[in-house]
Every structure is written in structure tokens, then in C-alpha cells.
Image (cartoon, helix red, strand yellow):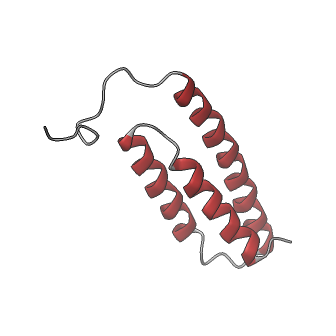
Amino acid sequence: MVDKAQVISLCRSLLRAGRQYPDYNIREYAKRRTLDGFRMNKNLTDHSKVEEAYAEGKKQLEVVERVVKVYLAYPPKTKNIMELKLQ
């Protein structure tokens, strides 16, 4: 049985993991995707559906953490226009 605290913890973990991307566009996509996914499933009442959605969220967290490690190991050579500072 998944309780509310576990769901909130998963959401925060996904948001924190998404903030580690060095690329602005990917950071914003991860944030938007996380929030949209949780908003889409906020009205689930069937316990099996809640468990299923929670398991999918845990899988996505593992994927995000793995991809962040790759991005940090091989950062992009050019900066995004959103990351350039005005000179």
C-alpha cells in the first residue's frame, strides 16, 4: 500500500533529480513531465492503479538518475541560448 507521504517523496525526488541536468531544456522538460504526470494521476482511487503509477514513477526516477550521470560525464560542448550570459 502506497501512502501519500511516499508519493510526495517520489515527486520531490524526481524534481530534484531533474534539476541536476546541465542542459536548461532538459531540466525544464523533466520538471514539466514530472508535474504533469503527478497531476494526471492525482485523482486515482483504485489501489492497484495507484500502485501501478507509483511503480512507474520509481522506474522513471531510476532512468532520470542514470541519464543524469551520463550527462554529467559527457557535458554538451556548446551552451544553450538560455544559459549564455549577456556580456
Q: Residue furthest right?
A: 1
The residue positioned 62% from the left and 63% from the top of the image is: 11
Q: Quadrant of the N terminus?
A: bottom right
The residue positioned 49% from the left and 40% from the top of the image is: 21
Q: Quadrant of the C terminus?
A: top left
State whether residue 61 is above or below residue 5.
above
Q: Residue furthest front?
A: 87
Q: Please state if 44 lies on the left or on the right of 30 as rendered.
A: right
Please count the marks in the image: 0
Determine the image quadrant of residue 3.
bottom right
The residue positioned 66% from the left and 48% from the top of the image is: 61
The residue positioned 71% from the left and 46% from the top of the image is: 59
Relative depth, front residue between 8 and 52: 8
Residue 57 position in % (x across, y down):
67, 55
Residue 30 position in % (x across, y down):
48, 49
State whether residue 36 is above or below residue 43.
above
Determine the image quadrant of residue 46.
bottom right
State whether residue 73 is above or below residue 25.
above
Residue 64 position in % (x across, y down):
61, 42
State whether residue 64 is above or below residue 35.
above
Residue 49 position in % (x across, y down):
73, 67
Q: Please state if 44 lies on the left or on the right of 22 as rendered.
A: right
Q: Please state if 13 lies on the left or on the right of 26 as rendered.
A: right
Determine the image quadrant of residue 69.
top right
